[in-house]
Amino acid sequence: MTLSADRLSYSYSRVRLKPDTTTEFTLRDVSVRIAPGSLTGLLGPNGCGKTTLLKLLAGVLKPELGSVRLGDREIRTLSPRALAQQIAVVPQETHPAFDFTVMEMVLMGRHPHLGAFQLEGPADIAIAREAMTATGITHLAGRAYMTLSGGEKQRVVIASALAQQPKVLLLDEPTASLDLGYQLEIASLLKQLNRERGVTMVLATHDLNLAASVCDTLVLVREGRVLMQGAAREVLTSSTVEQLYGVIADVSFHERAGHLTVVPVRRQ
Amino acid sequence: MSEAVALAHEARIRPIRIRLAITLAGFGALTVATCLLAPLVGSTHISLARAFDRSIPFADNVDAQIFWVARLPRVLSGALVGAALATAGVVFQALLRNPLATPFTLGVSAGASLGAMLVIILGISFSAGPFSAVPLASFAGAAVATGIVYWLATPYRRAMSTTVLLLAGVTLNSFFSALILFVQYVADFSQAYRAARWLMGDLDVGSFEPIVAAVPAIVLAFAVFALLPAALNVLSLGPDAAATRGVDVVRSQRLAFFSASLATSAAVSLAGPIGFVGIVVPHLVRLMVGVDHRIVLPASALFGAAFLVACDLAARTLLAPVEIPVGVVTALIGGPFFLWLLVRRS
């Protein structure tokens, strides 16, 4: 199912927006199309509106203008439950207020599939276990989530999102707080899940090399507008990096890594 | 992994259905035993056989009078108030995403206390069926406090801000406390004593009537609680994370806030603001059964009932024939426990 945003505008200010005013928009007239099975990167500098766009795509925020569609339905017409059965989100960090076990955290992904008084049964547990196998955390099942390392936590949250069995997975800077080793690990996990399970993914990040290594499609966002979108190889160039970040950079294909790499040289 | 660690590991990942069944059976048995035993213990020894002996006229049967009039209403109100405060504590802690929240954090009890104080000081006294002036006034005070906090913390059709909720509650709490002090200051000596005694909390309700008056509100609150536990689990990850897992955040927060406020209001109007039950019980329960609200909430209802009945038993027997106010007993147990919890967390 295609996830598409059509001419979205959004502002965090409480003032009612009229199309002709010059109120500061966080996002302005943004249209993107996420093809089924793709792994799309949302790229842009801090504060450009990546996270806002992701929240709008997830239905957490409601756009002032424009609409988000999943297949041929507008997501605002779906109940939170119906939406969560189709779209899951992995935030940058997840801090539960209580000391849940890893198993409990993963099983929370089953929430949109359970009735009001329904407890998860063997089928749900099997789905959760499978998600934990896919992310390599079966051995942590009984551990307290809060005692895990950053990389393990992120794998738990990804497993929880997989247990939701979504058609689309939205990830907001999933590797931002991780060191190099975990970054590579999560990147290859995402690539693998996308390829083997056909989960459509949208990845918001400002890590150009992460995006280059996993994404097949890129959407470049600058100051609340889409600068460019298309196949990663065509979009990611020295000139677009300069436009996006104001940084002179070398963009070249790295033989051993097998993808484009970006080496920043200096500020414009 | 050693065998003990492996066993503990297995216990933590046992399916919810099994954990829930074990927990309910265990805590249920404890609560039933406490509530059956408590009316039999006291400064005067009574015989259960005589208390139930219908052949002796009630007016001449001291055992029956003590059992039915002095002790049973007290145990029942203890169980009801304990269950209500403990579950309200669980719900507020999840709603505010703060394990240190209590049923009194948001000013509900301060509002209730102010209402009760005013009626006591003004010397208003009336009753209509099971309803009488002081409980009604405290319930009304709680409703006003709840309304103010809700109004402050809820932007139109958006999720509640838990930070504003907390700050508004804490501020309202100290504002009402100042008013309570002022009202007490202008009161005469005997009224001020009655007011101070009310603030300590008292389960000696004297008859079944006040209990009957509080039951509908508590039952309604519990009915709403039954809808909440799964949503509370997900809400404790944060409102955005809850929304992306299919929780209607605005609706769930509203239900949680009003049901927990209702349970607190009813409990406080029945027995005064008995402290620490709402924080000690949820934490003890979590230490025993983990943090899943689908288990913690019913277990806290049962354990809260047993805990408060036991505290009240201690209150009326430890220094018999002198009675210690039950709020003092719960605070004496709860205060140090709370500090231990704080130190352990950091």
Image (cartoon, coloured by chain):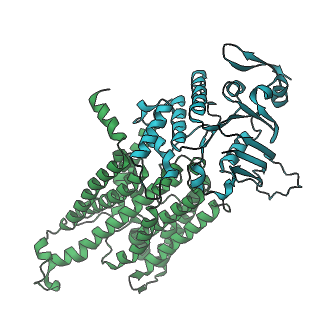
Residue A209 visible: yes
Q: Can residue A99 be seen in this view?
A: no
Residue B1 at x, y = what percent?
Answer: 32, 26
Instruction: In this rendered view, identify the residue nearer to me: B233 or B61.
Output: B233
Q: How many labels does the image show?
A: 0
Q: Which of B127 and B24 is in front in this view?
A: B24
A89 lies above or below B6: below
Q: Residue, x 31% and y 57% (percent of image)?
A: B307
In the displayed structure, B17 sits above or below B196; it is above
* Chain green in the figure, letter: B
Residue under the point 27% across and 32% down:
B4
Q: Which of A102 and B279 is in front in this view?
A: A102
Q: Chain A is drawn in which colour?
A: cyan
Frontmost residue, A5 versus B334: A5
Quadrant of the snapshot with the N terminus of chain A: top right
For image coordinates 37% across by 56% down, the residue present is: B300
Q: In this view, does B17 lie to the left or right of A41?
A: left
Position in image of residue A9 (x %, y %): 79, 50
Residue A47 higher or lower than B43, as above or below: above
Instruction: List x then y, in percent, for residue B80.
Output: 35, 67
Residue drawn 85% across the image and 58% down it: A18
For residue A134, above or below residue B133 = above
Relative image position of residue A242 (x, y in whole percent): 84, 26
Corner quadrant of residue A222: top right
Q: Quadrant of the C terminus of chain A?
A: top right
As drawn, is B148 to the left or to the right of A53? left
